[in-house]
Structure formats: structure tokens, C-alpha cells
Image (cartoon, rainbow, N blue to C red):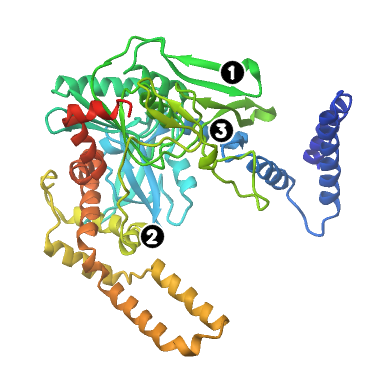
Amino acid sequence: MRKVKWIVSITVIAATALAFAPTERYFEIAKSLDIFATLFKEVNAYYVDDVDPQKLIRKSIDSMLESLDPYTDYIPEDELENFRVTTTGQYAGIGALIGVINNKTIITHPYKNFPANKAGVKVGDEIIAIDGKKVEGKPTAEVSSLLKGPARTEVELKIRRSGKPDDIVIKIKREKITISNLAYAGLIGTDVAYIKLDDFTPGAAKEVSDALLKLKEQGANKLIIDLRDNPGGLMHEAINIVNLFVPRDKEVVSTKGKVQDWNKTYFTLNNPLDTEIPITVLTSEGSASASEIVAGSLQDYDRAVLIGRKTFGKGLVQTTRQLSYNSQLKVTTAKYYIPSGRCIQALDYAHRSEDGSVEKFPDSLRSEFKTKNGRKVYDGNGIDPDITVEDRYLGAVTVALIQNGLIFEFASKYCGEQLTVPDLKSFKLSDADYSKFLEWIKSKKFSYSTALEASTNQLMEATKQERYYNELEGQLADLKKKIEANKASDLVRFKKEISEIIEQQIAFHFALAEGQAAISLPNDQTVSQAVKVLSDNNRYKSILSPD
């Protein structure tokens, strides 16, 4: 009840203060706050069952902010640590990602050169206990909390590893962990630098710079920056990355919002690393926010050719505001605009439909802008690549195998049975190995459904409702049989793509990102297109020239 009294008191004080504001808007705010306070008091006092005041308030806060946009969030004190890890990439622990795969808590990524990796923890290891406390069936958040702790303290893991008859006990000394923003950096061929950037936490620009300098020493004179599925992060890191490739004193991004004093234009401040190296930037629907600042700015300055898919379209800026009781509010305060003047926000949160859904800005309202060279670009719906590469769609059986964790589990089993690490540059899953995979899948009683099955079931329901079922029953039954027959052969029909996914997962198990890159990059259509463009200087220049 003390919490309730505190909430009511604060609300009444706020309402009283705002009631004397001269505008009708402030009166409505005060009125609404007063209604909420009295409503909450009545519900708490008279609702038939006991209620949790804290949960009710949290629900109301979350619902209110959700009605604005997905990026405005309330962060209570007990969630601040996770928020800091997300924004800074830093924490103290063993340096490993964990996940739940088929009801087991599994090490999915021990970061290279961090405590877990150095102690011998491998991808696929199942955590059985931490410091003697069993964790089987525990939520991931609880297990993660046990693994974290002050730097230089020791934690003991009991793990189960495929191929080993007995559980293994490993003692690990925690360290301060700073997660790298780069998933991978290496050469493709002899002269193309490939840098996969996954985040924009502190140090991202320096990591890109250091990686490129190292690759240039090895002979790189062309660059691929892979921003696919990079959700963004810190704006100033995006600005600094753009600054690596364009001269100083160039506008990169400006922000415009309700508070005029907060509106600002950001320029490159440093001498660039290289203003001549040919660049391609890879984008996808998962490239958002800071990724779009980098991709869009380099496109606006005709400094890079964008290849892949249209980006997500997040042109909103968030600011963190301190609240009482050490809680915080991450609130959308502005929209950002890249050098050509365009805002690439795709969803119009200010104008929701009656059902609460949000629509994209229609093409008819998109405005035309020009790059430095005079090429046409558009606002309002993400960033369009200069060269579109269609997504490779996996078969339903392949997707189901991935989602069910079966490919990951088989890779763990396969690696546990190997006495030596194969040459990953030439590694291929043999026919015999794939046959073993099929036998193993049978033992797992694997089943899945397809979109075609769902559509057929809907069609059958529709024929029943419209009373055509008796006439079509035989044909529909035949269709279902054919679908089932096709499904029975899917594991054979999709052997090539399933094998490729298994090979990539095995390579990751053995050698983390370096291993996965060795397998996946040669088969990546978007990367191949980027290499082709960079290898043809005339084509590269023509793409960056006006129509």
C-alpha cells in the first residue's frame, strides 16, 4: 500500500502543478493523470482478487509506450545492467553466449580469446551445473546471471560434451568482457577486404579501421562492408565509420525533433583513412538505424555501391532520460536525416490504423533526392540498394531443421566424434555423413508442416463451410497424399542446401566465425556479386554515375 500511496501522491502533485498551466493541453494531462490515480486506487482496493500494484503499473507503462513506437522503452533499475550490456557490449563474465536448444542449456558461442574459449569450452557444450548448482531446466536469464560476476572471480562449470562419456568440470576466471563489433574480417581472394560488422557499440569505428589497415598490409585494395542484419547502435560510431572514407567537415547525419535545442547536424571531424578505395556495402531487411546511416551516407556521397536488399527503415533517434528510483526512459526524440536530406523512416507511427496497426509510407508520398553525383534516391521506406540481390529462400524442411535445433545438435555430435579438425577451406559433408544424418533424424522423430499443407487445410475448411466438400473430397484427399509423399522425400530433395547449412555449422563448431566464413563466403550470392562489381572498375564507376 505504501507503493500505491506513493504513486497516488506523485500523480496528485503532478496533476496539481499542471492544472495551473495556461494551456488546455496541460489541463488534459493533469485531468488524465488524476483519473488514472483514482482508477488505480479503486482497482487496488476493491478488485475481487489480490493484485500486484507493481505489475499493474508496469503493464500500463508498457502499453502506453508501445502505442508510440517499438523503440520507446521504460527501463526499471533491475534491468539496467542488461541495457548497459546491449549498448556498450561490456560486462564481466566468461565471454560466451548461451541458449536453450531442445530443453538443454547450450554454449552457442564462446567468444574467441575470452575466458571460456581459453579454458577449452566448445560450441555445443551443455551446461549441467554452475558452482555445484544444477541448471538443467532453468531459464536462460538465470543461468546467464550465474555465469556473470566480478572480474577475477572464479566460476566452476560442469558440462556435458558430445562424444565424451563423462561430464567435464572446467574452472574459469571471469574477466571484463568487451564484445567485438566485428564478426569477421579477412581477405576474399588476394585483394578484396571483407569486414562483417554486427554492432555499433563503443569502438566499432576503430575496429573497422584496424581491420582494414591490417588487410591492406596483406594486399587488399578493395573493400566489402557487410551490414546485413546489423540492427544498429551508437550514432557517433556510425559517423566515425563514414569518416573513414569521406573527408573531414562533411555532413553525415542531422537530427530534428520537438525540442529545437536538441536538433543538431553531425559532421566528420577527423582525417579519413582512405577516400579512394572502391567500396561495396551489403544490406538486408535487418540492416537498421546506425547501419542505415553508414550505408545511406556512403550512398549519398557516391562513395560506395550498395548491394543486397532494401534496409529496414529506422530513421528514429532515441535519447535516454533519467527517472526517479534509478530507472530510465529510452524515448524517441527525433528523426535523422542523411546528407542528401532524406529521412529513411519506413513506418508511419504517427498515423495508426483503427486496429492499431502501422503502415509504411506509401510510394506516392516518397520524395526524390539527389546524391553528390546527381543520382536519384528516395526517402520514406528504408534505403534501396544500387544492385538488388534476391534472398535465397530455404525449403520448409531446412527451416524446420534449423528452428528445431537439429542441425546444431548434429554438428555437435559430428564434431565430438572427430579426432582431428578437417581442412575447413575444402570441407564437404560426404554422402556417407549425410546418410548418418538421415538415420539420426529418424531417431529424433522429426516432423514439420509446410505452408502448402496449411493452405490445403484452409481450403478444406472453406469447402466445408461453402458446402462443396462432398464434391471435392476425393481431389482434396489426393492432394494431401501428394503433399505427404513430397514431404517424405524432402530430406533427399533438399540435400544440397541442408548439407551446406550443416557444413557451416560444423565449421563454426570447430573454428567459430573464421571457420564459418571459410565455408559460407564462397557460396554467398551477395558477396559474389560484390566481388564482381569491385573487379570491374568501369561498371563500379558507372553505377555511381548519374543516369
Tell which of 142 and 472 is nearer to you: 472
Instruction: Pinpoint residue 172: horizontal percent, then vertical percent.
Output: 33, 37
- Residue 215 seen anywhere in this rendered image of the structure: yes
Marks 3 and 1 sit apart, C-alpha to C-alpha, by: 27 Å
Q: For the residue marked with disc 2, what is the amino acid?
A: Asn
Residue 169, compared with residue 77, is above or below; it is below
Q: For the residue marked with disc 3, what is the amino acid?
A: Leu
Instruction: Pinpoint residue 354: horizontal percent, then vertical percent.
Output: 68, 51
Q: Which residue is mark 1?
A: 263
Counting residues from the start of the chain, the first of labels 1 and 2 encountered is 2
Horizontal relation, residue 526 to residue 192: left or right: right
- Within 10 Å of disc 3 (Cα), the crowding (few <14, some 14-19, many 20+) is some
Horizontal relation, residue 361 to residue 386: left or right: right
Classify mark 2: helix, strand or loop: loop
Q: Which residue is mark 2?
A: 102
Q: For the residue marked with disc 1, what is the amino acid?
A: Asn
Marks 1 and 2 sit apart, C-alpha to C-alpha, by: 49 Å
Snapshot quadrant of residue 79: top right
Instruction: Pinpoint residue 507: horizontal percent, then vertical percent.
Output: 20, 47
Counting residues from the start of the chain, the first of labels 3 and 1 encountered is 3
Horizontal relation, residue 29 to residue 420: left or right: right
Q: Which residue is mark 3?
A: 80
Q: Nearer the viewer, mark 1 or mark 2?
A: 1
x 42%, y 40%: residue: 147
Classify mark 3: helix, strand or loop: helix
Residue 474, compared with residue 27, is above or below; it is below
Residue contact at pointers 3 and 1, CB within 8 angstroms? no
